[in-house]
Image (cartoon, rainbow, N blue to C red):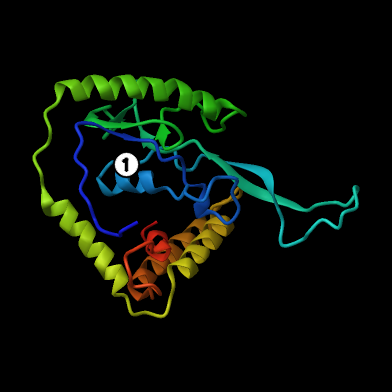
Amino acid sequence: ASGSVESVYAKTVLLATRGMGRVFSASSNNYESTGDGLALALNAGIPLQDMEFVQFHSAAIYGKSEMSGRAREQVPVAPAVQYCMGGIPTDTRTRVLVDEKGMPVKGLFAAGECACLNVHGANALGGNGVLEALVFGRIAGKETAALAMEQKWPAPNGKHERRAAARVNALLKGNGNRSPHETRMELQRLMTRHCGMLRNKRGLKALLKGLSACRAQASHWEPGDRGKHFNTGLVEALE
């Protein structure tokens, strides 16, 4: 709530950040499913796996149509993202793998929708996501606890904290003509149009071009609220 950057040191780290359904316009995922855990891994040099496997259900009401109250009124629906089978590559012990040879990153684990162990193939059956979380959540708890008992506390390193603080301050000092919300809406529109149920080479090229434009907009954001306390706009910008 204070907006200050704090370092949290740990002997082991478990990523359990759900998926990235909210990068699409329509999704049944909660609003926090913006792929933050996936981005953390990717930015640390860990490749993601099977990210093309995204499950869609006809779970969204199309457009802004509202039911008139008549029982037999037809309701138009549209595909909505339900579950992402891809994610951070792990082994059966939930250890994060850094390459195709199965080399684990010591002390880093992932479980749940953000992880990818290929237990679902290209399509998760109904209810199996919960089963995955229960099974591998238990395994992850045992593995992280056992390793933490053997590990020493890492030495403090202010480099990462300074980098994070610089990023936050840069966002707060932005003096552009775009808002993070506008960029997020454009990102969702592009993903839905070009990376939805039907994809082709031409559309994916257009998506890459559009995503580059969205990235460039980050240097032209107007934060609105420049304070740090309870700044929900800053949270949205970081997401």
The crowd level at tag 1 (other Cα within 10 Å; few <14, some 14-19, many 20+) is: some
Q: Say which element carries label 1.
A: loop
Residue 11 location in percent, x, y?
19, 31
Residue 204 vs residue 118, the one in the foreground: 118
- The residue located at (53%, 61%) in the rendering is 190
Q: Quadrant of residue 180?
A: bottom left
Residue bearing mark 1 = 47
Residue 106 location in percent, x, y?
20, 29
In the picture, the quarter occupied by the N terminus is: bottom left
- The residue located at (51%, 27%) in the rendering is 120
In the picture, the quarter occupied by the C terminus is: bottom left
Residue 165 vs residue 109, the one in the foreground: 165
Amino acid on which the number 1 mark rests in the picture? Pro
Q: Relative to 63, say whether 82 is above or below.
A: above
- The residue located at (53%, 59%) in the rendering is 188
Q: Is residue 81 left or right of residue 58?
A: left
Residue 159 vs residue 91, the one in the foreground: 159
Q: Is residue 102 left or right of residue 73?
A: left
Q: How many marks?
A: 1
- The residue located at (41%, 32%) in the rendering is 116
Residue 15 location in percent, x, y?
34, 36
Q: Relative to 25, say whether 15 is above or below.
A: above
Residue 164 location in percent, x, y?
23, 57
Residue farthest left in this picture: 155
